[in-house]
Image (tube, helix red, strand yellow):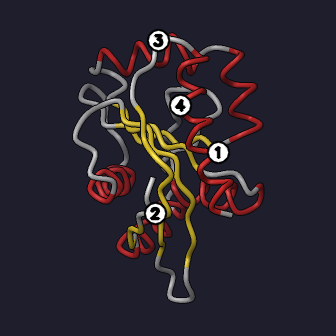
Amino acid sequence: MKKLLFPLFFLAIGLIQLNAQNEVYEAENEGWMVLLEEAYNESKKTGKPIMANFTGSDWCGWCVRLTKSVFSKDEFKTWADDKVVLLELDFPRRKSLPEKLKVQNQSLQQAFQVRGFPSVWVFDMDRDAEGKYNVSAHGKTGYAPTVGEFTGAIEQMLAQRAEKK
């Protein structure tokens, strides 16, 4: 996959404000982060890429199926702990997100040009001295019916990432 760079400087101020607020919102899937800044910090600390799941957790049938058939399985959780930093970017209809989280998720949806759900992107991020983010995307996928099929698609992206380094 060709290298894509997305300047995400428009998120920097919003993320700082979101982190400063005491609004507590947890991901639908256990072990997933909801704040890009937290995922970025974990990615930098561990050297793992971020795997972002753009989901409609309370209305998207394929998203619910992906959670049930892949994300909720111990096999996936073990694989993910070793390979990626998990970031959930939710677009619910029946529950509300904190406003700053909505802004973050919508900004990332625009940056990655997400038009359908679920969309799962794997990427690395860097931040320059001005606080602007640059994203190096490794690929995207969607629904897969089994852990093996899903992780196989992600493994291909990780292999391409390793070749670039």
Q: Are marks 1 and 2 in contact (CB under 8 Å)?
A: no
Whole-Å distance between the Cαs marked 1 and 4? 10 Å
Instruction: Name the residue that disc number 1 marks.
Output: 159
Query: Where in the figure is residue 162, as x and y percent of width and height?
Result: 68, 54
Tell me if mark 4 has few (under 14), some (14-19) or many (20+) residues whose alpha carbon lies within 10 angstroms of its own.
Answer: some
Please tell me whether mark 3 or mark 1 is closer to you in this view. Answer: 1
Query: Where in the figure is residue 151, as x and y percent of width and height?
Result: 60, 27
Dot 3 or dot 1, earlier in sequence? 3
- Tell me what residue is drawn at x 31 percent, y 37 percent: 91
Dot 4 or dot 2, earlier in sequence? 2
Q: Nearer the viewer, residue 101 or 89?
A: 89
Dot 4 or dot 3, earlier in sequence? 3
Tell me if mark 3 has few (under 14), some (14-19) or many (20+) residues whose alpha carbon lies within 10 angstroms of its own.
Answer: some
Query: Where in the figure is residue 138, as x and y percent of width and height?
Result: 50, 52
**13 to the left or right of 50:** left
Locate the C terminus and report the quarter of the image it occupies: bottom right
Name the amino acid, label 4: Ala
Q: Are marks 3 and 2 in contact (CB under 8 Å)?
A: no
Toward which corner of the image does residue 159 lie, by quadrant? top right
Instruction: Name the residue that disc number 4 marks.
Output: 153
